[in-house]
Amino acid sequence: MANKVRVYGKAQNRTSLGIMHAYMVMYPQATLEDLRKAFPNSLATDNGTGQIFIYADEKGTNADWDGYFKAPEEVLTDGDGKKVAVNKMWTKKSFENLQNHASQYGIEVAKFEEADKGFGKKGGFRLEYLNGYVPPVREEKKKGLPWWLWLLLGLIAAAAIVALCLPRGEKVVEKEVIVEKEVVVRDTVYVAQIEDIEKNFNAAQFEKGKADLNDDAKLALHDLAKVMKQNPDLKLNIEGHTSSEGDADSNQMLSEKRAQAAVDFLVNKEGIDASRLKAVGMGSSKPIDETNLEANRRTEFVIVE
């Protein structure tokens, strides 16, 4: 099988997490049961957690300790829409087992030295699509009609039968029945791609107090530009966010500069039309985790509907 996704990581556990994210990109309908079949516990018998995958909200002796990736940007979303946490304890032996096993799904792992820059102190991962590979679209599972719609359809059918049974010449007062049409909005390919690129961009990190793009940030923006060129109707707001440390006015200005730096690169270096992008500085006004300042220092790529 020709490799379809390459995983870059700076540490064993984060690269392992990247492998699992790559699998979900390739098989977005996979459930927790599917994941356990694809990556059996026998790959990491020495991990100490018992299970490679658990539901993120699962409780219990092994589930409650810090043995799983459970941050919002780390968990997987399975085909049932549930959040799945991945084991973070990987020895050298288990990691080698995982790498070899993942190759059968078209997933390869880059050497650590090739991913040495831009992942921050805690490490990180990023994904690269190979050989023109485009991930499949996650399809929403079909839902049955709600009870009230069945009732309404029954009433309409009953009214139709009564109308047919009435003697000719009698007038039937018709009532207009308005039935709301259920619209299922399906994920598009670029949504998953943009989420991955956003993670890679944030993993690259800005230097403290600066708005200069490093090489890994530029690489992530290059990938974003390719997605935008493939989807000419796609428009984005680039939102810069900071932690609450320091002066609020300075944080606001810094977030604006960082967002604008990303927009300028996409416009001036990648040729994206400026009308499709907007830089927005949010300062420290929208923290996502009051206890984790690093998580609040982020850039978000928001799709404009």
Image (spheres, helix red, strand yellow):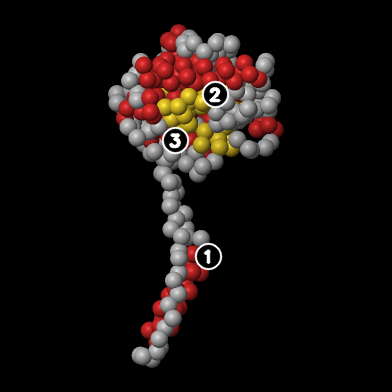
Classify mark 1: helix, strand or loop.
helix
Q: Is residue 282 above or below residue 122?
A: below
Nearer mark to the viewer, of 1 and 3: 3
Foreground pick, 293 / 209:
209
Q: Which residue is mark 3?
A: 304
Classify mark 2: helix, strand or loop.
strand
Q: Amino acid at mark 2?
A: Gly
Instruction: Please give left or right for residue 269 compared with residue 144 in the image.
Output: left
Which residue appears at 47% of the width and 72% of the height?
154
Q: Could you tell me how many numbered marks the image carries?
A: 3
Q: Amino acid at mark 3?
A: Val
**Residue contact at pointers 1 and 2, CB within 8 angstroms:** no
Q: CA distance from mark 1 to mark 3?
A: 33 Å
Q: Which residue is mark 1?
A: 148
Which residue appears at 45% of the width and 64% of the height?
179
Q: CA distance from mark 1 to mark 2?
A: 45 Å
Note whether residue 97 is visible.
no
Q: Is residue 194 above or below residue 81?
A: above
Which image quadrant for residue 29? top left
Which residue appears at 60% of the width and 23% of the height?
283
Q: Which residue is mark 2?
A: 281
